[in-house]
């Protein structure tokens, strides 16, 4: 199916899904979430896809939920509807894919974007990229898995600092902490990701 907020290509066993709202740092609008869910279903139903690479267009991976986009049709008396019916399904699909998943983090991964990256099996980030839990700045708690991911992946003290202080975590530090697999020079990100994806694509049961 045609997509407006992302692009999907499958070649040589690798499905590459690129969030494509570069002007908004690939923030997730209602339409983007609907299309993300559809794209992940398409990937799950594509036998030739043996690995998924998830990345973002432009200078960001994903800046989280799009707080400026309209959300038509939501029930004003159900504040959980957007999170439950639009965010949770694609994240669950990503987590349950039967093929390896790689997040190629080329820039900011904030809020729901950070959770999106951490939902993948392997995260490779450019050294210029960073991770951010901005929820404290808008009076919310971390969602979409971050409140579970972070304590389990980096320990209670570091998780609490990330969530309660809302400070940027550079990719290099994220790798040192064990939050992500590897931090690489920006001009090496594509080749590092391609090498890892190629290994999965060439593997045989």
Image (tube, rainbow, N blue to C red):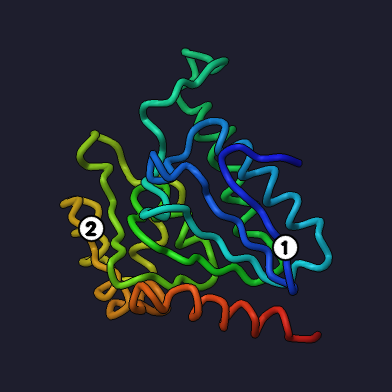
Q: Position of residue 12 (x, y in %)?
A: 74, 74
Left or right side of 30 for 50: right
- Judging depth in this view, the residue of 20 and 28 nearest the camera is 20
The secondary element bearing badge 1 is classed as strand
Residue at 73 percent across and 86 percent down: it is 203
- So how many labels did they put on this image? 2
Instruction: Report how far apart the C-alphas of labels 2 and 1 lie in the structure.
Output: 36 Å
Q: Position of residue 140 (x, y in %)?
A: 29, 37
- Judging depth in this view, the residue of 183 and 76 nearest the camera is 183
Residue at 76 percent across and 51 percent down: it is 42
Left or right side of 12 for 6: left
Looking at the rendered image, the disc whose residue lies closer to the viewer, 2 or 1, is 1
Quadrant containing the N terminus is: top right
User: Would you call the spot at circle 1 few (<14 residues within 10 Å), some (14-19), or many (20 or more)?
Assistant: some
Q: Is residue 161 above or below residue 113?
A: below
The residue to which callout 1 is attached is 10
Q: Earlier in the sequence, mark 2 or mark 1?
A: 1
The residue to which callout 2 is attached is 162
User: Would you call the spot at circle 2 few (<14 residues within 10 Å), some (14-19), or many (20 or more)?
Assistant: some
Residue at 66 percent across and 40 percent down: it is 3
Q: Position of residue 95 (x, y in %)?
A: 60, 59
The secondary element bearing badge 2 is classed as helix
């Amino acid at each position: 199916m045609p997509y407006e907020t992302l692009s999907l290509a499958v070649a040589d066993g690798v499905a590459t899904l690129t969030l494509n709202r570069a002007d908004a740092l690939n923030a997730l609008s209602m339409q983007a979430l609907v299309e993300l869910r559809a794209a992940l279903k398409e990937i799950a139903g594509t036998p030739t896809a043996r690995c998924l690479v998830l990345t973002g267009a432009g200078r960001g991976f994903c800046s989280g939920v799009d707080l400026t986009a309209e959300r038509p049709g939501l029930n004003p008396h159900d504040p959980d509807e957007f999170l439950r019916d639009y965010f949770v399904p694609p994240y669950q699909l990503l987590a349950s894919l039967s093929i390896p998943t790689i997040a190629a983090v080329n820039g900011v991964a904030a809020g729901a974007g950070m959770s999106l990256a951490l939902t993948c099996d392997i995260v490779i980030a450019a050294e210029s990229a960073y991770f951010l839990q901005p929820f404290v700045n808008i009076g919310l708690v971390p969602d979409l898995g971050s409140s579970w991911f972070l304590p389990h992946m980096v320990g209670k003290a570091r998780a609490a600092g990330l969530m309660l202080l809302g400070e940027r975590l550079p990719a290099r530090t994220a790798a040192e902490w064990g939050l992500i697999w590897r931090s690489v020079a920006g001009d090496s990100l594509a080749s590092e990701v391609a090498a890892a994806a190629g290994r999965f694509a060439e593997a045989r049961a």
